[in-house]
Amino acid sequence: MNTIKLAGIIATALILFGATAQAQDKVEKPDIVLGVGGKSSLYYLPLTLAERLGYFREQGLNVTITDFGGGSKSLQSLIGGSADVVTGAYEHTIRMQSKGQNIAAVIELGRFPGMVLAVRKSKAAQVKSFGDLKGMKIGVTAPGSSTNFFVNALIARDGVKPSDVSIIGVGTGLSAVAAIQNGDIDAICNIDPVITKLERSGDIVVLADSRNEADNMKLFGGNNPAAVAYFKTDFIAKNPVTVQRLVNAFYKAVKWLEKATPEDIVKAVPEEYYLGDRGLYLAAVKASLPMYSRTGIISAQGMQNGLSLLLQFDPEMKDARIDLSKTFDDRFVKKAAAGQM
């Protein structure tokens, strides 16, 4: 075989190989809808960064973000089919498995919940324990959301049932602040920047804080995975390239966040996130930085802590057989970390 013919065969083979690789890497669903409950909260900061820094576009994705008042509503959008993916609390994957719904997280965005349970200052003298919240009105982001679970788990430690308190949805922004300041609720479980704003104004006294490692050790004995991106498992099976691209974008945002200064972060988000006070938002960012995931991987202990939290208060979980390995699919984040994107 002469050299010219051999070169032609090699060139043809390379073209075919490239075409095959490209076909294998084709995004099955470039236009996807993402549901979230309270996008402007720091709990979901990696989502805002992936959007604002252009990481979704880099991956060939057109992501339409639908923002709801709380995580339970974004979960409903996934179950109902109006969203393809949700950024929400990890524990939803566990609860849905107990209900026969196959949902899996594909990347951890928050390793700590970042939630704070606090009582209105005028009520602080009569609340010395979680049990003292019995009979009170407690504001959460939305009924059935992770802030609601957090309240249920903490009051259960003192023998208080979910039915012993009144749960009221107050959102994640100025409506939550107003609910405390107007006396509409006695206590609140929320996330930053709402909590930092209420702390600075002296309107609340904190009962439990899950924004840092030390307090998570006290509350849960270790990390407790918080915000994740989760899909229905059949979507993952049918659209693996799409899922990989989304995870790539989120992973890049998590790694950017790991190295960014608080000032970098403040500059990257929309001004409306500041709740009218840039200095307040900067303080909230500093308070929340420890809670973000460093690796995107949910540890086995973290998954177990998430399940244990639910078992403390949810009677529906009592006899459920949960396979925690099915709540988190680590294949995509491992590829992103290895640069196999």
Image (cartoon, rainbow, N blue to C red):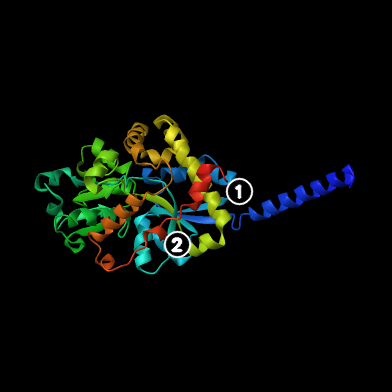
265 left or right of 188 in image: right
Q: Earlier in the sequence, mark 1 or mark 2?
A: 1
Q: Is residue 193 above or below residue 134?
A: above
Residue 60, labelled with which disc? Answer: 1
325 or 99, which is in the foreground?
Answer: 325
**Please, is residue 273 above or below residue 15 in the view?**
above
Say few, some or many: other residues with alpha carbon within 10 Å of mark 2 (under 14 / 14 to 19 / 20 or more): many
- Indicate the amino acid at tag 1: Gly
The disc at residue 78 is 2
Q: In the image, residue 260 lies at what x, y percent?
A: 44, 32
* Secondary-structure class at tag 2: helix
Q: Nearer the viewer, residue 290 or 276?
A: 290
Instruction: Mark yes or no: residue 169 visible.
Output: no
Residue appearing at x 37%, y 65% in the figure: 97
Q: Which mark is residue 113?
A: none
Q: Residue 30: give x, y in percent of width and height.
A: 59, 54
Q: Residue 281's x, y, as percent?
A: 35, 36
What secondary structure is marked by label 1? loop
